[in-house]
Image (spheres, rainbow, N blue to C red):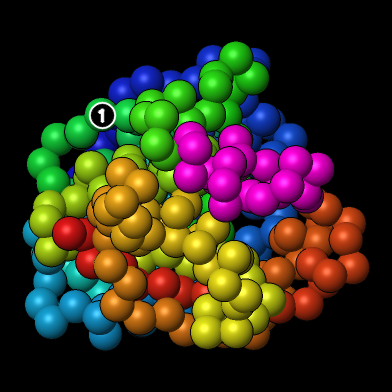
Amino acid sequence: MQIKRKQIDPPPNARFAYNDIYADWWRSRTTDRAHGRAYRNIAGFIRASLPREPRLIVDYACGAGQLLARLAPLFPHTRLVGLDGSEALLDLAATRLARLPKSRTAEITLACTLLPMGRPFGEKAELVVYTFPNMMPLEEEAPGADLDREEHETARRLIGDPGEEADPALLEYGRSISRDLRRLLRRGGLCVRAEYADSRREEWEELILRQVEFEEGSLDLPEEGIRPWFRVLASAFFRSRVMEDVYEQTGEDRDRSGGYLITVLRAV
Ligand SMILES: C[S@@+](CC[C@H](N)C(=O)[O-])C[C@H]1O[C@@H](n2cnc3c(N)ncnc32)[C@H](O)[C@@H]1O
């Protein structure tokens, strides 16, 4: 099995925190049993969601490759691509993947790039995975700059009154990333997201649900110029201590307990 390394549009080392302190933080977080169980569960969930092995799976912001290493034995004939901005985490991914059994033949590519890429990239995948995101724009970037006027207006409307805790720019950044996820997929392909959460999707208030739908690209508001790129097929909530990743970042008590939500979306 070959592991290829590629440079697409790497962020400058000095200005990307996941190349130093955050790389160490993330590595120390993900070595516990809660993360091991979560990656195994997500990989099994993905395998069960697909009737056959696809040709290409992309792991968007793959980090140190824990999920790729779980997917590789379940999809021995599928080409895997991991995209991430952190050369340090991609080095760890390469070391981890090099330990996989030699019987695996399909190629694995690890590509260093700033995300979102904002443009299509190579062959379209049947499946894109996006797990435990903690995306960071470069300081000089204007997140959501690729959205059109209607999308900016909808983001502001979904936030409600100024002074609310949420920020339309964050919704816009999330939406730009979802657009990138859609660009990587062929029509009918699947996007599997695993995100920190404290409750099931069915329990969310209407406004929160609309905000998430806007970000993930499943909101359908044709009269406001918002078309869906994805349809939600399924979602499942798992209680897990991985939520402490969020608590370590925010220090907020409400982020102490919860777990993660797996959402399966179909590209339309
Ligand atoms: C919390 S880690 C999750 C990694 C992986 N998906 C997982 O589940 O283990 C977030 C990852 O996103 C990457 N990342 C954050 N912002 C990025 C950006 N703007 N461009 C590229 N990669 C980014 C980091 O380098 C890091 O690997």
Residue type at mark 1?
Arg
Q: Is residue 180 visible?
A: yes
Query: Which is the main secondary structure of the residues drawn in magenta?
Result: helix
On-image quarter of the C terminus: bottom left
Could you tell whether 249 is left or right of 7 in the image? right
Residue at 71% x, 55% y: name it: 28
Q: Where residue 154 appears, x then y in whole percent?
A: 48, 44
Q: Where residue 12 appears, x then y in whole percent?
A: 54, 15
Residue at the spot of label 1? 119
Helix, strand or loop status at disc 1? loop
- Against 45, is 216 above or below? above
Residue at 21% x, 59% y: name it: 267
Q: Determine the image quadrant of residue 204.
A: bottom right
Residue at the extreme front = 223
- Against 158, is 256 above or below? below
Residue at 55% x, 19% y: name it: 141
- Against 57, is 172 above or below? above
Could you tell whether 162 is left or right of 85 in the image? right
Residue at 45% x, 24% y: name it: 145
Question: Was residue 166 drawn as part of the magenta stretch in this picture?
Answer: yes
Magenta span: 152-171
Could you tell whether 250 is left or right of 115 in the image? right
Could you tell whether 227 is left or right of 261 in the image? left
Q: Closest to the observer: 96 or 250? A: 250
Q: Closest to the observer: 217 or 196? A: 217
Q: Closest to the observer: 212 or 77? A: 212
Q: Where residue 140 appears, x then y in whole percent?
A: 60, 14
Q: Closest to the observer: 3 or 215? A: 215
Q: Is residue 112 visible?
A: no
Classed neighbour count for the residue bearing mark 1: other residues with Cα under 10 Å, few (<14), some (14–19), many (≥20): few
Q: How many marks do you count on the picture?
A: 1
